[in-house]
Amino acid sequence: MTSLRCLKGDRSGLLYLAFNQDNTCISVSDMTGIRIFTLEKSEHVLRLDMGAISIAQMLYCTSLLAYVGAGEQPSLTPRRVTLLNTATNLPIQQLTYSSTVLAVLLNREHLVVVCELRSFVYLLRDLGAVQTIEHPSNPRGVGALSGQHEPCSLLALPSSSSAGLLRLYELRGEACALLAELRAHSAPLACLTLSPDGQLLASAS
């Protein structure tokens, strides 16, 4: 699952672009709302005109969509994640935080919300909180979640704001188990991604 956040004022007008977990669809958000396209047929399958959206993340090709406002309207605060059923256009749940949401990560078992100093892990089936992971400042919202949740559900997060260190967690179980801490780069991490099965981890600084 790959995503790109764009700076406001970018000439393209885009605020966010992301592939879904199996790379069959792409979600795009801008100052007017969200667009979803299928890549197999290059079709425009969903349009939501709701205002400026900074994050729009799909769960495979299901009707579940997680989005975060860009703060241009009071109702679209960047401190809230909304889970939307696109089949009914009705919100399922809203989760509000004390700081800006920088990334939303999804697989079929877990939802992870990344803020600058904390990441929040939930079970997707009932949005029960699993754990809050505290970490050094992560202003880019760098993080990665394996797309598949079997046989493991892996989460990678930076563990340093001055060096390229990361921690790898196993989310399955009652608490997030720390599996390893790795030194990937000498400079701070700029990007992380896990292969769908969690067997490969790529990083950039």
Image (spheres, grey):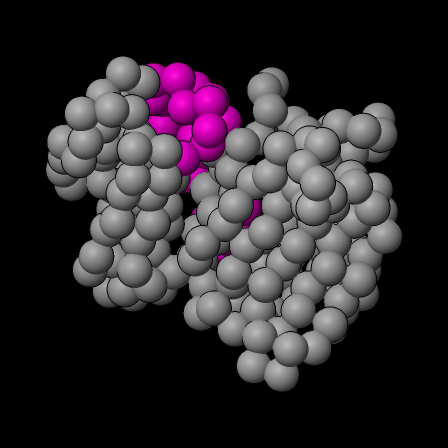
Q: Is residue 154 left or right of residue 127?
A: left
Residue located 56% across and 40% down the image: 5
Q: Position of residue 181 (x, y in %)?
A: 15, 33
Residue located 78% across and 34% down the image: 76
Magenta stretch holds residue 182: no
Specify the quadrant of the image occupied by residue 185: top left
Instruction: For residue 71, say whether it is visible.
Output: yes
Q: Position of residue 97 (x, y in %)?
A: 60, 25
The magenta-colored residue range is: 115-142
Instruction: For residue 94, say whether it is visible.
Output: no
Q: Position of residue 40 (x, y in %)?
A: 56, 81
Q: Is residue 111 left or right of residue 186?
A: right
Specify the quadrant of the image occupied by residue 204: top left
Front residue of 93/114: it is 114
Q: Quadrant of the C terminus?
A: top left
Residue located 43% across and 57% down the image: 1
